[in-house]
Image (cartoon, grey):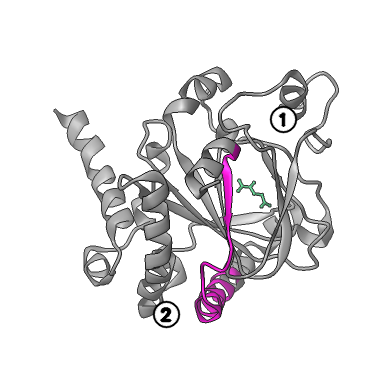
Amino acid sequence: MESAAIYRQQGHLIVKALFSPSEVDALSKIVDRIHGQWLNENRSSYIEQRLVNMHSLTHPRYFEQQPAERLRFFQLLSAKQLTTLLTDLFGEDLYFHNTQLFFNPYQNSRLPYWHRDMQYSPIDDADLQAEQPNMLALHIRIPLLPETGIELIPGSHHRWDTELERNVRLELNGHTNSESLPNSVLIGLEPGDILIFDAQMLHRGNYQLNPCRKALDLCVGRPHRLTLPYLDGDNLPTSAELEAIENRQWYKLARTMLIEPRQKQAD
Ligand SMILES: O=C(O)CCC(=O)C(=O)O
């Protein structure tokens, strides 16, 4: 089956060896420095709240001493082979939304939890279900270490929950969100591979199988009224940086999206 058909059917797609070893190495060095700063500033939250990720790795706060590295990071995140692949699969109208880094919780002190990303927003579950056919919010997982780090339920991007899935995801009727669910697949990835998946499909991490985890995540999607309010302009390239980025279309559209809704409100 061709890649677009696999994604349409499953809600996820693995592409092997998309990034070269030198690109992975360059990303890894930048991510390590950012993660190190974040950990210095957030160590108690990391431990007490059993955090499993951080977000907004492109924020200027991580580049005060290394301004040139921010541009390099944006360039690596929009590598030509990645933007071309995503355009072939989903079209031209994609924007850069944010980045995240997933890691193991402190001392593996937490169980992975099934969820659909936007269930943690104030938006009602019924509204999310109704809008699901109209939304495209993607995670592009870029593992910087080998991992068996994520579990998905194929096909759950184009349907809502079964009764069991709902009970588990929302912890209803005595269920917990860490219970096993039927028909799930556990994904193994090597550095260089990417996993593309729908942020609203049923998924959870896996913390047990990876002695150490460093999974960079790029959030890209089509502009939608439910996701755009979460776009933070601080995470986007400045005008000067934008001019210097070769494949700038995702960033350009993101910047446009920050301006347009305000203009519409003013009309
Ligand atoms: O990779 C993980 O640990 C979980 C991923 C996840 O929850 C997400 O991408 O929203």
Q: Where is residue 25 in the image (x, y as percent from the top left)?
A: 55, 79
SS for callout 2: loop
The one nearer the camera, 56 or 160, is 160
When the figure is inspected, residue 20 is found, relative to residue 195, above or below; the finding is: below
Question: What range of the chain is rendered magenta?
Answer: 10-35
Q: Is residue 47 visible?
A: yes
Say whether residue 198 is visible.
Answer: no
The C terminus, quarter of image:
top left
> In the picture shown, does residue 139 fall above or below 179?
below
Report whether 12 appears left or right of 84.
right
The residue indicated by pointer 2 is: 65
Residue at the image point whose x is 77% and y is 28% from the top: 168
Three-letter residue code for mark 1: Arg
Residue sitting nearer the eye, 170 or 253:
253
Contact between marks 2 and 1 (CB within 8 A): the answer is: no
For label 1, the residue is 169
Q: Where is residue 14 in the image (x, y as percent from the top left)?
A: 59, 55
Where residue 10 appears, as percent x and y from the top left, is: 60, 39
The earlier-in-sequence mark between 2 and 1 is 2
Residue 210 picture location, percent across and down:
78, 63
Marks 2 and 1 sit apart, C-alpha to C-alpha, by: 42 Å
The verdict on residue 13 being magenta is yes
Residue 53: in magenta span: no
Residue at screen point 52% across, 67% down? 18
Dot 2 amino acid type: Gln
Helix, strand, or loop for circle 1? helix
Residue in view at x 63 percent, y 55 percent: 53
The answer to which quarter of the image holds residue 125 is top right
Disc 2 residue: CB within 8 Å of ligand 1: no
